[in-house]
Image: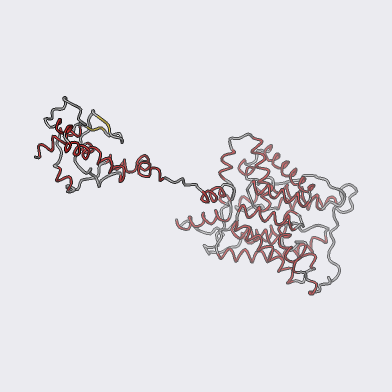
Amino acid sequence: MELWMEKSAFSAGGLCLGPHLPSPGIHWMCSSEPGRVLLLIHVFLPFVMYGEKGRMNGQTLIGGAADARPGPLWTDPFGNKAGEAAHRGVPPLTLALAGGPPEQESEEETAMEDSPTMVKLDQGENQVSPCRGRRCFPTALGYVTGDMKEFSNWIKDKPQMLQFVDWVLRGLSQVVFVSNPISGILILVGLLVQNPWWALNGCVGTVVSTLTALLLSQDRSAIAAGLQGYNATLVGILMAVLSDKGNYFCPVFSSALNSIFHKWDLPVFTLPFNMALSMYISATGHYNPFFPAKLFTPVTSVPNVTWTDLNALQLLKSLPVGIGQMFGCDNPWTGGIFLCAILLFSPLMCLHAAIGSLLGIAAGLSLSAPFEDIYSGFWGFNSSLACIAIGGMFMALTWQTHLLALACSLFTAYLAVSMSNLMAVAGLPSCTWPFCLATLLFLLLATNNPNIYRMPLSKVTYPEENRIFYLQAKKKGMVESPL
């Protein structure tokens, strides 16, 4: 009986190829009804099991083609050749159905299991696309949020003019530490809502500054991130804002501080803008016949502050106005658009921007400042910039640095009013001097607390990514605060 089963298995393995197979039972297998049933079991059942499971615990259901030594007669659907099973014999049917002894899983079957083709055969029509319906929305949103690194990589081999537009848009957005061309477009829209001429001045300043950086062979990565344009953006806008006679534009930009601050791994912030604008207003002044600027005078009388006159709606509007005053704009709609641009780049940054503006308002109320100054956003923009810088941008965000950002924001607000009074004696605006000086002071703060971690300047991107870098470095035991 065992010999008959061996011959029958050989007949099934040969697929009844005719008289050239030396098996006396082959005609019975192909002609009689029981033989055909057994033939079907021999040939097709192993492949059915392969289609469902991919393997049978290292062995086929019965001995045959899958366990046979490779031969030249035929090939199964997985590319395995078979046909010479009879040369080494086949185990009896009873042992095969009982499961037989456990065998080592062959390398060929392991490769088949891990093969992508095998996965496709297993899943068949039940495969579901990884991007379908609402799942695609977060994926698509990831391409337009943050610093849009994928877009930067894609645009590298595109025409130079297209890259230049990207650099200019990033330069517009870098005023608020944002490196995102779509945010730059939103900021440009906000400037157009405020004043089209101011928007033009800001764009021209950014373009001229970026071209100058290219001609001077400055660092191309800094140019691509917009770091060579944002100071000129402010210079262009604020010269138009502070002009007392018509609208004009005279771009002045200086970035020599980069080489100095690089030694301490510190950002230059808007110091070049402050230096350029202060120098320009000092040189021209209010009484210049061609380029008169607004007149800045110190406070000479006690302001009339009546708390019953405090308008809650105006106080609420002063929050987005404080954001808009980063660009010298006092329109609440413009400030709201700027907040949307920041939100697109980083929700954490948007949160700290709003908190900083709110803390500036609270600082103004605590000193009984004139309500008009609070409504105009004067108290909000410096403290908002400081809160952004410390709250996750240049320091990894933890609850300790969050509290430090709140403290820096309040300190900046009080420093702003004191510097405003001091610089008004010289007929100069305080600009963003308070933000730069206060934030640099907090960044140089000495501490041994590893949770107050200043980011290496070369690794700074946006708060969410900065926190990931910090947590990875902390996990590897590489966190040592450079403060």
* Residue 338 percent across, percent down from the top left: 69, 54
Residue drawn at point x = 58 percent, y = 56 percent: 463
Question: Which residue corresponds to the image point at 60% horizontal and 54% vertical from the top-left?
Answer: 346
Scheme of colours in the image: secondary structure
Q: Quadrant of the C terminus?
A: bottom right
Can you give x and y, in whole percent of width and height, for residue 365 in the image? 74, 70
Report if residue 156 is visible in the image.
Answer: yes
Q: Nearer the viewer, residue 483 or 359?
A: 359
**Residue 75 vertical position relative to residue 292 in the rendered view, above or below:** above
Q: Give left or right: position of 149 versus 186.
A: left
Q: Residue furthest front?
A: 33
Percent x, y of residue 101 = 17, 47
Residue at left 76%, top 55%? Answer: 329
Measured as percent of width and height from the top left, residue 108 is found at: 28, 39
Q: Quadrant of residue 158?
A: top right
**Image check: 69 left or right of 302?**
left
